[in-house]
Each structure stands twice: as C-alpha cells, then as structure tokens.
Amino acid sequence: MAEQIIDEVFDLECEFLTDRQNHGKRLDMFVMENTEDLTRSRIKNLIESGQVKVNGEIKKSGYSLRYGDLVSICILPPVEMSLEPYDYPLDIVYQDNDLAVINKPRGMVTHPAPGSPKDTLVNALLSNLDNLSDINGVIRPGIVHRLDKDTSGLIMVAKTNKAHLSLSGQIASKECHRNYIALVDGVIKQDDGVIIANIDRNKKDRKLMAVTREGGRFAETHFKVLKRFSRYSLVEFELKTGRTHQIRVHCKHIGHPIVGDVVYGGSNKLFDNGQLLHAYKISFTHPATGEQMEFVIDLPDYFQNVIKNLN
C-alpha cells in the first residue's frame, strides 16, 4: 500500500506517497485501489477534470507512476441540481410525437451542469414540450447532441427513447448531417477542404479542447468557403464527427479562428459576444416513419448585420 499522508474528509481529499510496489502502476488503477465505490469511468473523469494530480500536475489515466510520486485526490462534493421548468418561448421549428427540432438561441446552455444549473435549453424544454426521452438521465432528458452556449441554431430533441436511440445511432453512423455557417478570421485560399485532426483536453486548461498529435479522439470536419472578404471568410462546415468544440478547435488549428471566439484565438472587433457560429441545417431519417427530414434556418439577425457591414 502507498503511504497516506493526509486524510481529510471533504467528499474525499487525500494524498498518497507511492512506494516501490506501485512503481510502474497505471494512475487510474492506483486511484481505484486507494478509493472506494468509484467506477472506472468515474475515475477517468476525475483524472481528466484535474481532481487527481501527480506531483501537482494533471496526468492521463494511463500515466505510469514512479517511486516517490505524490498522488493527490480531491473529489469535490456533488452539486445537487434540480430540473425546474423554465418559462422561455422556444423557437420550435418542428415537433411531432417522436421528436422536435429547436432553433437554440446564442447564450443558452444546452443542459444543466455545474456553473449552469438552471435556465438551460433542457429547463425550457420541460416548459414547452409534453414529453422527453430519459436515456441520458435526469439532467439531460431528450438531448441527443448539444450545441455550445454561444453557438446558435438547430438541435434535435428526442421525445421517446426509441427516437433517441435512432437519432443518436444516425449521428454515430454519419447518416445524420449537421451543417454550420461561421465567419472566420483571415482569407481561406482553398475553396473547400477537409480537416482531420484528433482532439483531446487541453493539458493547460482542462475546460478547453485542443488538437493533439498523440492520443485524443478522431475528428473530421469538412468545409466550403461561401464568400471572401478583405480580412474574413464566410464558411460552411459539415461535421463528420461530434467532438466537443470541434469546429472551433479545427478552425484555430488551420489558423482561421472563428470571429468572436476569443477562447480559441478569434478576433472580437466585429463581434464581441461569443463566436459567430450557427447550426443552419440538419437532416436525418425520421425514427418512426422513415421519412427523410431536412430543416434549414436563417442566420440570426446579429450575424446577418455583421455580414451586411462587411459588404
């Protein structure tokens, strides 16, 4: 056993000094052996979120421990979140007994999370829809995929579990097509192209994502330039995978961050209230009828005004 130095109950707060027997052991296995009632997935999330550190640094789950390493574990207490209906007039583009398509406004978080416990899209769905699937649990009912807080546009919502499984399966098999429009910094010379670059948590800031050469998850984004301005490009993107912040990270990777996305290096002279990224089109097969569905929504007014000013 490792030598335990501190044992203060917070939810769990302790430090271990590894001995020779733990030399070479995986970090996640070490945490599992020295804690109780934690699943592998829970431990992985704790490590990725920085609640487990080695010598004060965030490491990956597969990190091989060395003799004398100091492993600190600080598991924050769970935050209780209640799902209360939010009386907000959602823009419901389409709805039937199986699903709904919502035009999510910029500035609205998709589902409750620490830091955003209420007034989310999910809370508004409870006030606007009569039923939601429960596959994703209590906090994310009906949510098949998500949009970032400051990304506007179309999002599918499942009202039944059968529809949820079908829609999520179509996303996984690339049968569901999701298209976005963004204004990016700089003039993209290519008329179209494909960005393939793995995405993982940013090692310096675990709340952000980054392109990585080793590890991470495969990510593929297709793009087509719609219009060029003197210092900007209006671009259409299609997701082939659905990684967190994928378009934003891939745009930064190719040197053309999205306007307004200061988190990933975008300029804010034209717009300083979030990234100019809009999910304008979505197409899929209806889970119950087999009908091919396609929905298109215009750019929001603030986005159109920026384009008009550029013209």
Image (cartoon, rainbow, N blue to C red):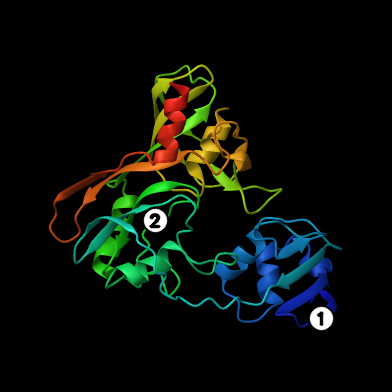
Residue 17 appears at what percent x and percent y?
A: 84, 69
The quadrant in which residue 66 appears is bottom right
| 302 displayed left or right of 198 | left
Q: Position of residue 281 (x, y in %)?
A: 30, 42
Badge 1 marks a residue whose secondary structure is: strand
Most foreground residue, 72 or 228: 228
Image mark for residue 145: 2
Viewed as shown, does residue 187 lie left or right of 89?
right
Question: Closer to the camera: disc 1 or disc 2?
Answer: 2
Say if 279 sits above or below 288 in the image: above
Left or right: 205, with 120 as reference point? right
Which residue is painted at 43% across and 33% down in the image?
305
Residue 253: image location, x then y, percent? 57, 32
The three-letter code of the residue at mark 1 reads Asp
Instruction: Please tell me which residue lies in front, 227 or 18.
Output: 227
Q: Amino acid at mark 2?
A: His
Does residue 106 sit above or below 198 in this rendering? below
| Residue found at x 48% / y 66% | 119
- Numbered label attached to residue 7: 1
The quadrant in which the C terminus is found is top left
